[in-house]
Image: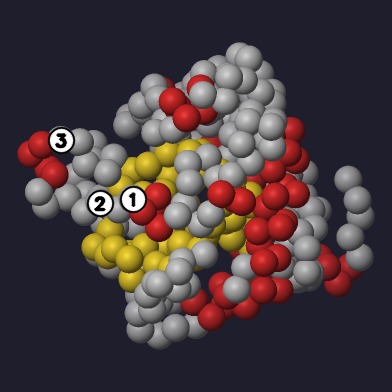
């Protein structure tokens, strides 16, 4: 692992491109580029409604909180990014999703079915992934693929009428596209933040009592917060920023990502170049 100079260790300082964080436990996380840092700080500094261009509102970041989280965009007429935001500087939290394929060499039991009461055997875009025809890959693996749960759907006829729903595809975000997550580290006393790349891999269903947002696979949560993350223990802070990118250029496709990777680090390396391109162009 490369050694950082001492000034880089004084919290998460920032560069124009992603730089690996100097921690063993939180591998494949990066220092936040200046443009993303500025965007993050602008959102967190707003004293009233964080979201200026609301696409859908009324969602819950936590079970015990209010339904004040919204899906937002930078431009309502021609969105290039979508993100989650609440009120008074709040963004979203980070719950853990264990859906998809279990098992494999990276499965350490932290996301077992027993530890995830709302486990689903299939992710929302399983069929899209299968159309990639990658040998040995039938669905996303939460231990390997750093996916974000983004968008809300309702299948229960009894809930459809009043359940809050949102489909990012209506605004140009495509399944299995690269996303960026700005998250606090597990040593957050000095306000340390990291950039982690993931993919849009699942959606929030109506299996609970409220339309929830802010959820990621165990591999992405580990990159942010370390191995204390489990299927039943996430992060309840409201300072996580999820960014989805509109357009086909955000989709790595069957050849642009190592879908058959055996661990998170290998998969993350495969999407890193595309993630860097997307965040550098972000306005």
Q: Secondary structure at mark 2?
A: loop
Mark 1 → mark 2, Cα distance in angstroms:
7 Å
Residue 135 position, x and y percent, is 63, 15
| Mark 3 neighbour class, 10 Å CA radius: few under 14, some 14 to 19, many 20 or more | few
- Distance from disc 1 to disc 3, alpha carbons, whole Å, reads 17 Å
- Residues at circles 1 and 2 in contact by the CB criterion of under 8 Å: yes
* Residue at the image point whose x is 65% and y is 59% from the top: 278
Q: Residue at x 63, y 41 (%)?
A: 252
Indicate which label's residue lies in the foreground, 1 or 3. Answer: 1
Q: Secondary structure at mark 1?
A: loop
Q: Position of residue 175 (x, y in %)?
A: 47, 41
Picture coordinates of residue 33, whole percent (x, y): 71, 68
CB atoms of marks 1 and 3 within 8 Å? no
Earlier-in-chain disc, 1 versus 3: 3
Q: Count neighbours of disc 2 (C-alpha within 10 A) and say few if under 14, some if 14 to 19, many if 20 or more.
A: some
The residue positioned 76% from the left and 59% from the top of the image is 18
């Amino acid at each position: 692992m490369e050694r950082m100079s001492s000034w880089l260790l004084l919290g998460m300082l920032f560069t124009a491109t992603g730089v690996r964080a100097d921690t063993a436990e939180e591998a494949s996380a990066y220092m936040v580029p200046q443009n993303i840092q500025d965007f993050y700080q602008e959102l967190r500094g707003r004293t009233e409604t964080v979201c200026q261009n609301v696409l859908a509102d009324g969602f819950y970041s936590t079970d015990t909180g209010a339904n004040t989280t919204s899906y937002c965009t930078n431009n309502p007429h021609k969105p290039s990014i979508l993100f989650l935001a609440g009120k008074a500087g709040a963004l979203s939290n980070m719950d853990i999703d264990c859906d998809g394929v279990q098992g494999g060499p990276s499965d350490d039991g932290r996301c077992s079915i027993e530890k995830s009461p709302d486990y689903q055997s299939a992710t929302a875009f399983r069929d899209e992934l299968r159309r990639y025809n990658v040998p040995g890959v039938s669905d996303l693996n939460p231990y390997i693929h750093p996916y974000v749960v983004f968008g809300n759907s309702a299948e229960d006829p009894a809930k459809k009428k009043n359940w809050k729903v949102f489909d990012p595809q209506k605004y140009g975000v495509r399944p299995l596209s690269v996303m960026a997550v700005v998250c606090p580290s597990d040593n957050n006393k000095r306000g340390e933040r990291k950039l982690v790349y993931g993919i849009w891999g699942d959606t929030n269903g109506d299996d609970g009592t409220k339309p929830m947002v802010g959820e990621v696979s165990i591999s992405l949560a580990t990159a942010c917060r370390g191995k204390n993350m489990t299927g039943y223990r996430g992060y309840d802070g409201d300072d996580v920023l999820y960014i989805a990118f509109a357009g086909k250029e955000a989709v790595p496709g069957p050849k642009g990502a190592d879908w058959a990777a055996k661990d998170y680090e290998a998969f993350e390396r495969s999407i890193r170049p595309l993630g860097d391109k997307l965040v550098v162009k972000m306005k």
